[in-house]
Structures are given as structure tokens and as C-alpha cells.
Image: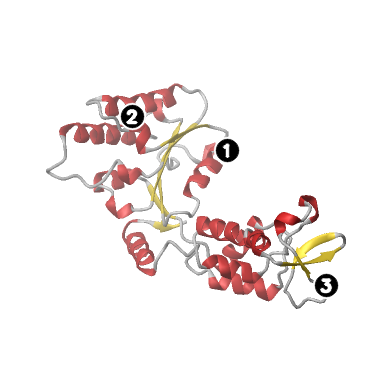
Amino acid sequence: MPLQFPHLFTGNRRPWKRILLYGPPGTGKSRLALALSSAITSTFYSISSANLLSSWVGESEKSIKELFQHACKNKSKSVIFIDEIDSLCRKRNVQEEEHTRRFKTELLKQMEGVGNTETKDNIFLLCATNCPWELDVAFLRRFQKRIYIPLPDKDARLQLFKIHTKNTCLDFSDEDWDSLAEKTHLYSGSDIANLTLGALFQPIRKMQSAKYWKILDGKYLPCESFHPQAIRTELKDLPAASVIPHQVTLEDFIKSMQTHSKTVSENDLKQFKDFTQRFGELG
């Protein structure tokens, strides 16, 4: 809206420029950042702790300062995305080394200026974390919005499965889709991607171990030994271009679940919900 209707965001009504995205791993926080950058046609700076932290004293503070200075010089809008911000901004303690304190002080200074000064008005700061409760309160306070990116619900999981299998031959009924979405409660977006890839390889694994084959439209497919057209042979003995796998079924996904389980627990979700009630809002 600020780009489409700039006259609505004048005076003290200024758009948020410092936003924290938090939630379980694999929920698409990094993809959201990239999508935002594309939507507003901006220069996108994607940064991680590895880019900023240096073993040389003073270099880390210099890196963060130069990053914001470079973004300021751009005439176009700039999005600075810092992933895994918790690795840079953990709660401070008395055992912290002096150069770490200086780095955090410099980062706080640069964050505070985003959206508050004319020189940094073209910068949008977006950060992401899987552990928001580990952030130092001073950093947490700098974010004008703290948005929870939750796990996909049942309908979203169903859509993700269909996206990941859109170019695949499937033998699925509506009941199969519903069952798959139901069985994958607590699966993140990346969990679903990994599970689907594992399921897509199940027909290939069956071909590798198959001892009996049938011919369908001139192609060889694995079959049971009792099939009336069963031919005893192995994959290595068949013409490479003449073999095809079975269509992917719900059974293949269930088999894949044995090695691709969910990575988020109910206890993890409770932590996120408790944090959201205190500091954030649902995205």
C-alpha cells in the first residue's frame, strides 16, 4: 500500500520499515523476503551471520556499517534481509567479549536508523529467526512488527503436495489427497518437499529390486510374480528406453514417511504460541 498510495502514509503515519519474521524452520520465511523484494522492485541484500561475523577484531562492526551505507546510496528501494538473526543478536551476558558487544551496538545503531532518518528512508529491514525467544530484548524492541509464520494447515498442506507433484503421474483419489493432508499434521513446507521427493523415488526403488515385469503398450513395468503376463527378468537386462515406473500412490507417501518424519513438535509450537501472545502477531 505505501507504494500504491503514498499520500496515505505521510506525517506520523509512516509504514513499518523493520519487521521480524519468526516461526518453525521450513515455513518459507526466506521466500517471503524474496517475494517482497520482487513485489516492490528493489535491490535485495540477503545476509547471514557468516557474511557479517569475522574472527578479526573490528571487522564485523565495519561489515554491518558498510552494508547499510551501501544500501543507503542506492537510489531505488533496498531490502536488507538478515536470516537467522538470533545467531547475531542473542541475549547479552557478562561473559560476552568486548568485540561482540561492539558489533551488537553497531547493529542496534543501524537498525534504529532504518525508517527514522532521511538517509535510510529507502531501506526496508527484514529479519528472520526460528528462535525468537533467544533474541536480546533491545533488538526485539527495534522491530516495529513481529510476525509469526506458522506451519501450513491442512488445506495449505494439500496445496503444497499438489504443487510438488504437478508434473508427476499419480494414482490418487480425492480420499487419498485428504488422507495424505491429514497424516502430515505438523509437517513444515520443507518437510513436505522432502517427503514428496522421497515418495516420488519409491517407484524407482521398486524397479531396481523388481524380479517380475509385465508389458503394457510396449513398455515394461514391474509386477507381482502371480500376474498372468509376468516375465522373470531384472532391470539391468531390459532395454533402458523401454522401462517405465508405476504411477505414484498414497502407499508411496506412507512408505516415505518412515524416513521423512516431521521436524517440529507440539512443544515447539507451544513455544511459538507463547511468544506470539507476548510479543508478536499471526501472519
Q: Position of residue 9 (x, y in %)?
A: 48, 40
Q: Position of residue 215 (x, y in %)?
A: 83, 65
Q: Earlier in the sequence, mark 3 or mark 2?
A: 2
Q: Which mark is residue 191?
A: none
Type of the residue with mark 2: Ile
What SS does tag 2 mark? helix
The single residue placed furthest to the right in the displayed view is 217
**Can residue 167 be seen by looking at this rendering?**
no
Task: Choose mark 2 or mark 1, whichever is in front.
Answer: 2
Toward the viewer: 60 or 21?
Answer: 60
Task: Judge left or right: residue 102 versus residue 283.
Answer: left
At a point 66% along the width and 73% down the height, the residue shown is 176
Circles 1 and 3, Cβ within 8 Å, touching? The answer is: no
Q: Position of residue 111 (x, y in %)?
A: 33, 36
Circles 3 and 2, Cβ within 8 Å, touching? The answer is: no
Q: Earlier in the sequence, mark 1 or mark 3?
A: 1
Q: Quadrant of residue 102?
A: top left
Toward the viewer: 53 or 202?
Answer: 202
The quadrant in which the N terminus is found is top right
CA neighbours of label 1 inside 10 A, class few (<14), some (14 to 19), many (20+): few
Type of the residue with mark 1: Ser
Which residue position holds label 1? 38
Which residue position holds label 2? 64
Task: Choose mark 3 or mark 2, whichever is in front.
Answer: 3
Task: Judge left or right: residue 192 versus residue 234.
Answer: left
At a point 73% along the width and 74% down the height, the residue shown is 225
CA neighbours of label 3 inside 10 A, class few (<14), some (14 to 19), many (20+): some
Q: Which mark is residue 229?
A: 3
Distance between the Cα atoms at labels 2 and 1? 23 Å
Distance between the Cα atoms at labels 1 and 3? 55 Å
